[in-house]
Image: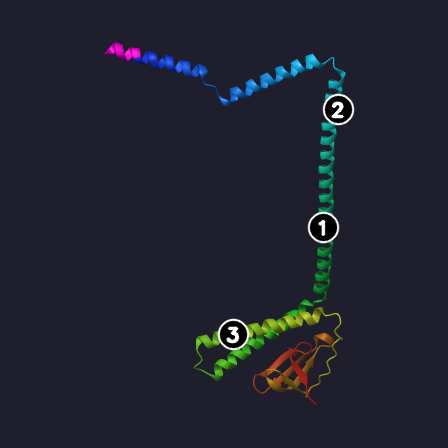
Amino acid sequence: MTNNKSENHEQNQKQKKIKWKFEWRNQDWVWLMLILSAIIYFLLTFRLADNIQVVDLFSFISSSVSIALALVAILIALNQSRDNEQLSSTLKTTMAIMNEKLSSVDEKVNKIDPDVLSRVLQQKIDNVITDISRSVKADSGISPEEIEEKYLHELNQLKLDFDSVIENINNTNTVPFLPLYNIGDEVIHKKWGRGTVTDVRGYGDSTEVDIRFDEVGVKRLLAKFAPIMKMG
């Protein structure tokens, strides 16, 4: 039994050796083809070296291939150069547009008087608070949802009014404002109705007027931006 196992093992080893000897890999075939090609090339070179026509033909083919490769390289370089020029032109145009936009923004920002802007915003906020308070006092049974709806409506109106103020400040074609309000003048407000001017402060675009309204009492407004109109 032991002898049979030993004989089988020896036969398996012999078969593996034979298989290893005759098993070719793809890499081995590639090397074989390269070696054979090199041998054929050297034989042809050796046998045809004395034939001037063959040598000239090989030289012509080599020169043609070199010229073709050079032309391909030139075309690639020209295409890359053209793409670079187009990219550079596009970048220059974009930068010019951005500079123009930034300059326009700088001009508009420089026209805004922070003090006037602050006072306008404060007045708008006071108006929102007054309107909401008046609504709550008029209807003590108002629900939180109704208060929220009123609040959102007033905030949207505040945004529209504020945008209108910014547009007026930045509008270079606007005729300079020359308020002509005097104490005792009757005015009408688009929300609070009729009122009477009780005091006038400042001058020009910064003129402020104190107006007594029947519904909300005395309010101080910037005459240029307030939604009021003189009566009579």
Q: Which mark is residue 60?
A: 2
Q: Secondary structure at mark 2?
A: helix
Q: Secondary structure at mark 1?
A: helix
The residue under label 2 is which amino acid type? Phe
- Residue nearest the viewer, comparing 35 with 77: 35
Please rate how many residues cluster around mark 2, counting C-alpha atoms within 10 Å: few if below 14, some from 14 to 19, many from 20: few
Residue situated furthest top in the rendering: 3
> Which residue is under mark 3?
151
Q: Which label lies toward us, 1 or 2?
A: 2
Question: What residue range appears in magenta?
Answer: 1-7
Please tell me whether residue 3 belongs to the stretch shown in magenta.
yes
Please provide percent x and percent y for residue 25: 48, 21
Please tell me which of labels 3 and 2 falls first in the chain.
Answer: 2
Q: Which label lies toward us, 3 or 2?
A: 2
The residue at the point 55 percent across, 79 percent down is 130
The residue under label 3 is which amino acid type? Tyr
Q: Main secondary structure of the magenta part?
A: helix
The residue at the point 69 percent across, 15 percent down is 45
Please provide percent x and percent y for residue 113: 69, 68
- Give the alpha-carbon distance from disc 1 to disc 2, as whole Å: 45 Å
Q: Secondary structure at mark 3?
A: helix
Please tell me which of labels 1 and 3 falls first in the chain.
Answer: 1
Side (left or right) of 68 relative to 2 = right
Please tell me whether residue 81 belongs to the stretch shown in magenta.
no
Please rate how many residues cluster around mark 1, counting C-alpha atoms within 10 Å: few if below 14, some from 14 to 19, many from 20: few
Task: Point out the image quarter for the C terminus.
Answer: bottom right
> Which residue is under mark 1?
90
